[in-house]
Every structure is written in C-alpha cells, then in structure tokens.
Amino acid sequence: MCGRYSQTKPIKTLKEHFQAIALEMDEEERYNIAPSQSVPVVIAGDQGREIHTMRWGLIPSWAKDSALGNKLINARAETVHEKPSVKSSFKQRRCLVPTDGFYEWQVRDAGKFPQYIRLRTGGLFAFAGLWSEWDSGKEILQTFTIITITANRDLESVHHRMPVILMPENYENWLAPASKEFPGLMKPLGDGLLDHYEISKTVNSPKNDSEECITPVSEN
C-alpha cells in the first residue's frame, strides 16, 4: 500500500514538470502527507493539464457519506477496472499525483522501521491515481486514490506492494480519456530505479511534517 508520501517542490516546479496550469494554492513544502489531507493533483482539464487541490481518500459520486473515503486511499491495479467504487474513475477520471518520495514500514523481529523511497536520480515523479467528485449537499469535494501493484525487486524486502509509478513519458497516455495504452502502464517500476533508506520514527505521526522525516537515521 501507499499510506504516506512527500511533495516538497514549489508550485512553479510542478507546473514546469507536468506542463500544467495551476489554480491558486499554498506554496508549502510537504514532507509527511497523510490520508484525508488536501494536496496538488494533476488532471486533464478543459485547458489541458490542470493542477487541482484534492483530498486524499476517494469518495465515489454515489456514496451516501464521506466515510468511504477513509478506506479508499489506495486501489489495487489488479481489480481497479471492475471494483464498483473506482471503475468509473478508472475509465474517465485518471490523475497524476505529484511526489518526490514515499514511505513504507519494513517489518523486522524488533518491530517496524520506516523507510523513505525515492528515485535514484532524485526529483519529481507521479503516482498513477484516480479521482472523483462527491456532492456533500453543502459543497463539491474532489478526492483521489493512489493505485498500487506488486512490489518490484527494489522494494520487495520492504513491503509486498508499491504504488504504480509513472515517468514523464507516460503522463499523457495515462491522462488521455480514450487512451488504450494505460493497461500497460499499471506495472511495477523497472528494477534499479528506486532507492530507499531508513529514517526516524518521527514520520510515524502525521503531526510531524518537516525535513527530519526524510533525514537518514545515520544523520539524526
């Protein structure tokens, strides 16, 4: 699964990397993004790629209340085309979730130890995501989920699942509503492209959102 991630780049960098326009939003660095929080997400809009602020935890349009969003922070690639809660979004509302790294907890005899995972080359990339709009009766909420797949060799010692990671050359095919290429994109990232290292348990609490969350334990 993917339950925490970081996005520390300014909106200007997101706009350049994703070749997108952005509505007014905060310029804050985020080192410990958690479910239910609102963050930048890239969609195919009327003006091309657009960066919107959405809440993490997809609420299907037909949901009676927002509670379902707490369970839908991730969607499995193997069943995303048929699961009632996400299949409509999979067909019509795919998105890119900007990130520069994510977290997973490695289970050992002595307990769980957080790992920070990023591209070996550093920099931005995207999770494959799905989004939806839900009418609460008072406002329209835009929400999203992150698709996961079986872990590759880089991460299988850390966790058996990983987010579906997309590189820039895949962005357009993923977002295009009529694209026939997206099934081939839902696979583990190639081996040798990711790096991970142990970090402080500071990251365990969503209240902690600073650079300390991504600092290797050897430097703490």
Image: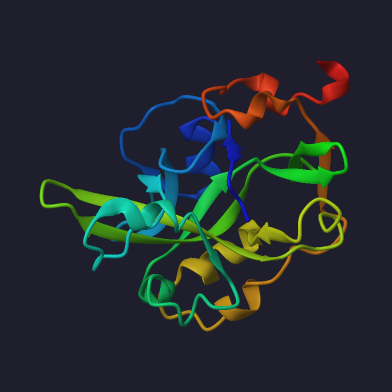
Q: Residue at (50%, 60%) from the top-left corner? A: 129
Left or right: 159 with respect to 45?
right
Residue 25 placed where, x, y %?
Answer: 35, 32
In the rendered view, tell whether residue 187 sits above or below residue 145. below
Left or right, 9 with respect to 105, comes to left
Q: Residue furthest top?
A: 220
Residue 48 shows in this picture:
no
Name the image quarter holding residue 78. bottom right
The quarter holding residue 220 reads top right
The residue drawn where x is 61% and y is 51% is 2
Q: Position of residue 175 (x, y in %)?
A: 47, 66
Foreground residue among 18 and 157:
157
- Quarter containing the N terminus: bottom right
Which residue is at the far left?
Answer: 137
Q: Is residue 85 above or below residue 193?
A: below
Give coordinates of residue 214: x percent, y percent: 71, 28
